[in-house]
Image: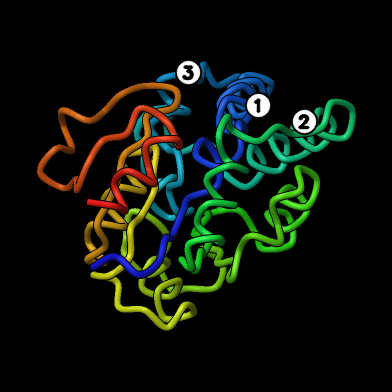
């Protein structure tokens, strides 16, 4: 029986994954690294040590992760300051439904807590979350299961009784390894074929989630 929901933020609740992809590429290219969309997609939700290994595997040992990331953060902050951030279609409706039906909800994101809180507040969704959990609060980020185990603990619910909402392979692996019933909601691509053995379900969008909870 599903008793709670744990959701990724970027690409699931917020329409922000496209910004990370854009600004990772722009930041890397500004330092002379030919980073493309497929590279940025490959490190979605990925914890720093894993991302460094992957990026240096693609671009060589001279790829300075922290320097490029700092540039990416600055570019994205500038954009969000000027244009704001948007919720994904159906996010508010889903969160309202979950609250009305007694499901506690936690966020499990690679984004620092302060930034995640700021973004959710901007789009009016912060009050719907019972816990905001960041990879910065656990020993290992995605694709390791730590953040989902921590989020379930914060909610006081066993991971096996949590529905996890994810859009990336790294997130799916993290949630599945934690024991959550993992739902893939594709955002910028559809990796469902390679992940099918890890999934409880695949959803077209957030409006499908109440149906899954009624099963």
Q: Secondary structure at mark 1?
A: helix
Q: CA distance from mark 3 to mark 1?
A: 10 Å
Q: Earlier in the sequence, mark 2 or mark 3?
A: 3
The answer to whether residue 24 of the structure is visible from this angle is: yes
Instruction: Say which quadrant the N terminus sits in.
Output: bottom left
Q: CA distance from mark 1 to mark 2?
A: 6 Å
- Residue 82 found in image quarter: top right
Q: Residue at x 47, y 18 (%)?
A: 37
Position of residue 36 measured from the top left corner of the image (x, y, whole percent): 48, 16
Contact (Cβ within 8 Å) of mark 1 with mark 2: yes
Q: Secondary structure at mark 3?
A: helix
Q: Residues within 10 Å of mark 1 (few under 14, many from 20)?
A: many
Residue sitting nearer the eye, 109 or 22:
109
- Residue 167 found in image quarter: top left
Q: Residue at x 31, y 53 (%)?
A: 213
Residue sitting nearer the eye, 14 or 210:
210
Residue that badge 2 annotates? 75
Q: Residue at x 22, y 51 (%)?
A: 215
The answer to whether residue 52 of the structure is visible from this angle is: no
Contact (Cβ within 8 Å) of mark 3 with mark 1: no
Contact (Cβ within 8 Å) of mark 2 with mark 3: no
Q: Residues within 10 Å of mark 3 (few under 14, many from 20)?
A: some
Q: Which mark is residue 37?
A: 3
Q: For the view shown, which residue lies furthest in the right direction?
A: 82
Q: Is residue 110 left or right of residue 181?
A: right
Residue that badge 1 annotates? 23
């Amino acid at each position: 029986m599903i008793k709670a929901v744990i959701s990724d933020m970027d690409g699931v609740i917020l329409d922000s994954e496209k910004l990370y992809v854009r600004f990772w590429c722009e930041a890397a290219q500004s330092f002379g690294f030919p980073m493309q969309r497929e590279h940025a997609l490959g490190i979605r939700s990925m914890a720093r040590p894993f991302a460094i290994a992957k990026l240096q595997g693609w671009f060589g040992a001279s790829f300075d992760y922290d320097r490029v990331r700092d540039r990416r953060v600055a570019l994205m902050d500038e954009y969000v300051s000027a244009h704001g951030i948007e919720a994904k279609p159906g996010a508010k409706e889903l969160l309202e439904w979950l609250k009305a039906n007694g499901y506690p909800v936690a966020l499990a994101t690679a984004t620092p807590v302060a930034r995640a809180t700021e973004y959710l507040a901007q789009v009016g969704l912060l009050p719907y979350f019972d816990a905001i959990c960041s990879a910065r609060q656990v020993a290992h980020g995605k694709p390791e299961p730590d953040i989902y185990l921590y989020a379930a603990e914060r909610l006081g619910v066993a991971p096996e009784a949590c529905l996890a909402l994810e859009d990336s392979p790294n997130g799916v692996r993290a949630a599945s390894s934690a024991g959550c019933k993992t739902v893939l909601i594709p955002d910028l691509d559809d990796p469902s074929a390679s992940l099918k053995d890890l999934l409880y379900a695949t959803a077209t969008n957030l409006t499908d989630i109440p149906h899954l909870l009624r099963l």
